[in-house]
Amino acid sequence: MLSDEQRRRLEQEKNSFEQSYELQSEKIARLRNALVIETDPSRKFQYEQQIKNEDTELKRLTDRLDEIEKQLQSAQSIPVISEPKSIQQTNMSLSGQQRKELQLALIDAFPNTASLEQMLAFELDKNLRAIAGEGSLQDIVFKLIQTANSQGWIEDLVRAACASNPGNPKLRDIARGLLPNHDPETSSVSSPNIPQKQKAPIVWSETKGSIGEYKEGVIPVKSTKVNLRNFIVEALFDNPYDGEAYNWTYGFAFQENTSNKLNDPQRKSFDIWITSKEKKWCFGTTNRYSDGYLSNLNVFDQSSNKLHLRAEGKIAIFYLNDVYIETFDISNFINKGDIFLIAKDGISGKSIQYKNLKVWSLDD
């Protein structure tokens, strides 16, 4: 049992180490930024060695913070000195270990600053740069958690992250541990978009089908013949052959119904597809393109991939095999349109088969 004086000293030490941790994180961020822009090999080597040393110091600070948190929590568990339960539930404050786990979960769920920034803006109407400034993703997430923890909206942050990426397993674990009355069987955290699917009407459904054959200079497409602006589309695609040996692609496309001509350049469209040889996702519009690596893509023959896209309001959220992949800005698309299955590139004569194609309407 800690005396009042011992507890006071531990709290002071904790505050001191937290300040040191923040300064150390900022120092590492500056060194990493310097490393990125440095061109001289000898200077780059010096930066790399310095970063390693500073990372070691950061770990030492983290370990000591965890020790202090354990001591304080152990003392708080004694009924005579613990806070009333109503106060503890209202003012959620994370331990050092919980902050570390939440940091890892957020980085896993939002692997770049842009996706984290969009989540915070859309779900909580907060400005990430105003909260965390510049720096590496690790440092930005640390500052975000620190601010939410100190200002009392850490629970809101966890709920917002889970709502934006409900399929992430690390976020699910965090939610189970931190959110009061969290029910993994009924919460949207347990499986991506299941509650929204149940409420939304299915407007197109096929048990199985084919997009068509790959042809040189031709992109096979399969129309769902819908007219929607906000929607969920999902399908299980069968791989046509070994994607490590020869490239294949398939995915979804959306095109506004602003004219009767399919190839009318005035009809705005966006595509989201996956490609086997490079194991990456691709997103494209008339004037924008982005891509990224896929760690959970099945590329071998006789295997399959489930693609899931939710387009609503200003964003489109893409999942692969029930794992969140990326969030895209579709704010410049304002008209209703058709949804297509597409196959951009592959061996001529080979066809893409799919199963369990469904489209849900999210329009009012």
Image (cartoon, grey):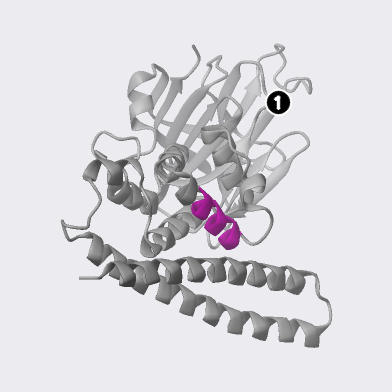
Query: In which quadrant of the rendered view does residue 245 lie?
Result: bottom right
Query: Mark 1 is on which residue type?
Result: Asn
> Horizontally, is 107 left or right of 184 in the view?
right
Report helix, strand or loop for mark 1. Answer: loop
Q: Residue at x 39, y 50 (%)?
A: 171
In the displayed structure, 150 sits above or below 159; it is: below
In the displayed structure, 47 sits above or below 97; it is: below
Q: What residue is shown with label 1?
A: 332
Q: Position of residue 265 (x, y in %)?
A: 79, 23
Q: Is residue 276 visible?
A: no
In front: 182, or 305? 182
Q: Position of residue 182 (x, y in %)?
A: 26, 40
Magenta stretch mostly in which secondary structure?
helix
In the displayed structure, 227 sits above or below 119; it is: above
Q: Which residues are magenta?
A: 137-147
Q: Position of residue 92 (x, y in %)?
A: 35, 47
- Alpha-carbon neighbours of circle 1 within 10 Å: few (<14), some, or many (≥20)? few
Q: Quadrant of the N terminus?
A: bottom left
Is 218 one of the magenta-colored residues?
Answer: no
Query: In which quadrant of the rendered view does residue 136 lie?
Result: bottom right
Q: Is residue 275 visible?
A: yes
